[in-house]
Image (cartoon, grey):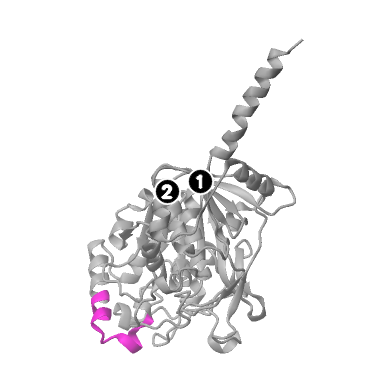
Amino acid sequence: MFNYRTLLVLLLLAWLAPLGAWANHVLIPMDNTQKEHLKAYGIAYWLLGKQIEVEWLLNYRGGSFACEVAPGVENEMAVRGVTYQVISGAQYTSILSEIADPNANMDVMKLEKVPKIAVYTPKGKQPWDDAVTLVLGYAEIPYDEIYDDDVLDGKLPKYDWLHLHHEDFTGEYGKFFASYRNRPWYQQQQRDSEAAAKRHGFKKVSEMKAAVVVKMQEFIAGGGFQFAMCSATDTYDIALAGLGVDMVESMYDGDPADPTAQSKLNFNRTLAFKDFQLVRDPYQYEYSNIDMQPQERGVYEDNDYFQLFTFSAKYDPVPTMLTQDHEKTIKGFMGQTTAFRKSLVKSDVVVMGDNKASGEIRYMHGTLGKGTWTFYGGHDPEDYQHLVEEEPTDLALHPNSPGYRLILNNVLFPAAKKKKQKT
């Protein structure tokens, strides 16, 4: 006797089977097949802004992105020159199965919100100043510019992610006095900073900067994500360690520094560094011994590299996200603060990139309260020794920069759906 139930089941299966092939996905590979790595992050940000869910495929083809096909998506990627593939639902399911294999160091991280981004930067910033604003512009990721007035007026909680522009939180104007004190931009910076300090009731710029870093600590502890490069890393911790201590000489604030300042530092307040020694000479272009000096590093432009660490995608998703790249060996680059002396880094800091032979850390991460911070040494990942008053880097010449990718990993990080650590 003919079984009509069996026939109906077979017909239903035959009808459903092609749906897996029709349910198309877009895969944005982030390995060496990608022509525009940096703009791909901008696409991920754009998709989130269109309420299109993005999946970050950690350690799959260099940390690829994927989403469902939606109107306008392919056109936007074509306009921006981003490499992509349209794949079937069955193909995407196969990729997810490969990632889910317990033996595969891969995972899927869902990106679910558009991070609201602030860059702490002065209105009179110079074009050579900051790699992050360069790459945000190139990737077409929007951000707000804020500075001391905004921080002290309590505006930080409006944002998810805060970048500290190439900054000197000690109140010494980058220690540029010896070389640039007669430059109009230096004199204007000093006038602007002194006016801001006066507006907020501070006698000195150094006191105002100390209040700013305290506000930033509150931002992190409350759940914010903070990222800093170059001198905004070590001067941030120096300012925290020296709260209430006059560490600044007379050409910067009108009176001599406390000769016992070193003995009054409190390293319990800092994010990353401990036991460092201040550089007391106001004419020396250095703040402390946190920064490794060129003569002791033992590297030059042709052999300056650092290695990214590999983390467990399934068990340590945070550092895994922050180290996604198509290269694990990153070309080094200098800055006022280039590399962090390993012996002065606190034991609870997560090291994500280093040069073991030189005893230096280049890229690291940590937590404070409900939030996180990341420090990245050096000034411009595609200009080895970017000097003051040089022209800014043209990122159209470096669309696949592994060093700049590390910055953009941090920008997307706040978009990730929170997962409980398994360790």
Residue depicted at 48% across the width and 77% down the height: 337
Return the mark for residue 73. 2
Q: Nearer the viewer, residue 11 or 47?
A: 11
Residue depicted at 39% across the width and 88% down the height: 283
Return the mark for residue 113. none
Q: Please indicate whether residue 166 sits to the left or right of residue 89 in the image.
A: left
Asked whether disc 1 touches disc 2, contact meaning CB atoms under 8 Å apart, the reply is: yes
Magenta span: helix, strand or loop, mainly? helix
Residue 50 x %, y %: 39, 44
Which residue type carries mark 2?
Val
Relative vertical location of residue 130 with respect to residue 139 in this rendering, above or below: below
Residue 65 x %, y %: 53, 52
**What segment is highlighted magenta in the picture?**
175-189
The local secondary structure at tag 1 comes to strand
Relative vertical location of residue 3 with respect to residue 288 in this rendering, above or below: above
Which residue type carries mark 1?
Cys
Q: Please indicate whether residue 204 sits to the left or right of residue 220 in the image.
A: left
Q: Is residue 160 visible?
A: no
- Measured in 3D between alpha carbons, the distance from the residue under mark 1 to the one under mark 2, in whole angstroms, is 9 Å
The local secondary structure at tag 2 comes to helix
Residue depicted at 49% across the width and 59% down the height: 83
Return the mark for residue 67. 1
Labels 1, 2: front one: 2
Q: Please indicate whether residue 211 sits to the left or right of residue 191 in the image.
A: right
Q: Nearer the viewer, residue 309 or 290?
A: 309
